[in-house]
Image (cartoon, helix red, strand yellow):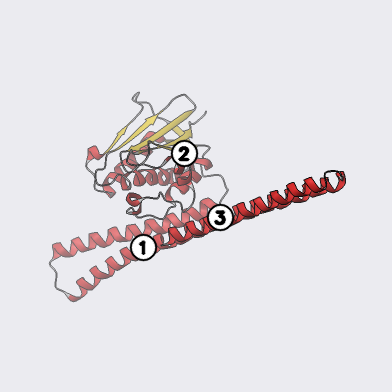
Amino acid sequence: MRIPSRRKKIVFFLVLGICLIVVAVTLNVSWIILHWRHSVLLFFGVILFAAIILGLILNTTYLVREIRLNEQHNSFINAVTHELKTPIASIRLYLETLQRREIDEARRQQFYGLMLEDVDRLLGTVDQVLKAGEADHKRTTPNRTEIDFGTLAGECVELARTRHRLREGALAMEGPGNGTAIKVQGDAAELRTALSNILDNAIKYSGGNVDVSVQIETPDDKRVLLRVRDHGIGIPANELKRIFKRFHRVRGRSAAKVKGTGLGLFIVRAIARAHGGKVFAESGGEARGTTVTFELPRSGA
């Protein structure tokens, strides 16, 4: 119900702003017609009406943005609440079962494993929120060291494959092919966070059939590119740039089924910028997959 309500408010303020602008323009034209012989009055009248129109446009734009931001905050709170509540409820259920029933050792170990997975999910959610706060306020230079980017990307791929229990062919990685190390200057922990977020997104938004490819390219001696391509639900053209904004999540029935906080790609963009790089997305549209490209300057470039 929130999306229709938000749209109604946006439409209301847009219509109100347009009506006020039309009224102001009408008054402006009338003023010019009535006072065209009085140059001083005409000049100040035009300036006054121009200021009124500009104020109305700015006011309407601000109100619409505030409505959008409110909706994003509400969506974020709902998403985080769900991401925190679900694993906590699961852990509580397993603990109550262990407390009230006699369970064999194999089953007990299985419960321990499931609870650890839920704890990891909780820690992941908390970590994303904390990193988003750091990305929004922290402007210090990362702790840079020389890193083998290919090795780091390979570790992230293996971690994602293990975390999501994927077969090897579902998440494949292809290097530059010349066997040489690709060095970058950066913070290994932050770059690992960025690559893991990109991979997790590609897997989550792939739907039931995960087919993700990771490619490392060196188009020249100054840059290294990591492309993560999936064949999932895709992204509408008008949202390709907005997906890197804080709290933003792709709309649509397919995307609504995927749980998340809307912070992953915002963190990726902040890390890329802090390292002198950039990140962008490409997609043929809904149901046509997505390619996210993470670009960094090479060491010594």
Q: How many marks?
A: 3
Of helix, strand and loop, which one carries label 1? helix
Q: Residue at 23% across / 68% down in the picture?
A: 94
Q: Which residue is mark 2?
A: 279
Amino acid type, callout 3: Val
Q: Residue 49: percent from the left, percent from the top? A: 74, 50
Lower position in the chain sequence, tag 1 or tag 3: 3
Lower position in the chain sequence, tag 1 or tag 2: 1
Q: CA distance from mark 1 to mark 2?
A: 28 Å
User: Badge 2: how crowded within 10 Å, few (<14), some, or many (20+)?
Assistant: many
Answer left or right for 253 relative to 23: left
53 over 281 or under it: above or below: below
Q: CA distance from mark 3 to mark 2?
A: 27 Å
The mark found on residue 82 in the picture is 1
Lower position in the chain sequence, tag 3 or tag 2: 3
User: Badge 1: how crowded within 10 Å, few (<14), some, or many (20+)?
Assistant: some
- Residue nearer the viewer, 185 or 98: 98
Q: Residue at 45% across / 44% down in the picture?
A: 239
Amino acid type, callout 1: His
The reply to whether residue 52 is in sight is yes
Q: CA distance from mark 1 to mark 3?
A: 27 Å
Quarter of the view holding residue 176: top left
136 over 297 or under it: above or below: below
The reply to whether residue 76 is in sight is no
